[in-house]
Amino acid sequence: MSYADRADMRLVKDLTALAPVEAKGYFALSDAAERADGRIPPKYRELMSIAVALTTQCAYCLDVHTKRALAAGASREEIAEAAFIASALRAGAAAAHGLLALKLYDEHAAVAS
């Protein structure tokens, strides 16, 4: 059994019906982020969405935004570059949180002594 299955998308209507107020807010934000009339062209919006989907590890988002990126004219090379950019930023965030871990260690050590 796979946790993420394209067929699960059939449950979107159920999820939306079960939490209509929250779903309305989510879709309003999503529509604003994915609008075609902004300064950022749709292809770039989709490449950014793919990069975010890779870092959040959302298979459903990855499926939807990869399809949209293709329709917006993105190439396989651009998808690959987006993947490595996302990888570098995720690794950078882990290293940056290493700074926080050291600071917290020092704070805990100071209290313990």
Image: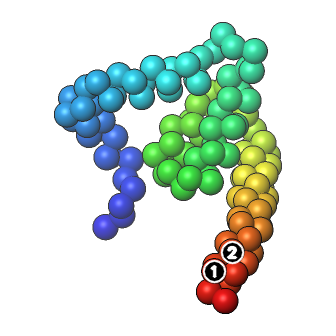
Distance from Cα at disc 2 to Cα at disc 1: 6 Å
Q: Residues within 10 Å of mark 1 (few under 14, many from 20)?
A: few
Report x, y in % for residue 6: 38, 47
Task: Using the image, determine if residue 92 lies above or below residue 10.
Answer: below
30 vs 87, left or right, is: left
Could you tell whether 25 is left or right of 72 in the image? Answer: left
Check residue 72 in the rendering and tell me which mark sits there, or answer none: none
- What quarter of the picture does the C terminus occupy? bottom right
**Coordinates of residue 81 in the picture (x, y in percent):** 80, 49
* Residue at x-position 77% and y-position 68%: 99
| SS category of the residue bearing label 2 | helix
Which residue is labeled 2 in the image? 107
Label 2 with label 1: CB-CB less than 8 Å: yes
Q: Nearer the viewer, residue 13 or 18?
A: 18
Q: Tell me which corner region of the image, top left, top right, bottom left or bottom right, holds residue 35.
A: top right
How many marks overall? Answer: 2
Q: Is residue 98 visible?
A: no
Q: Where is mark 1, residue-wise?
A: 111
In what quadrant of the picture does the N terminus appear?
Answer: bottom left
Front in this rendered view, residue 70 or 57: 57
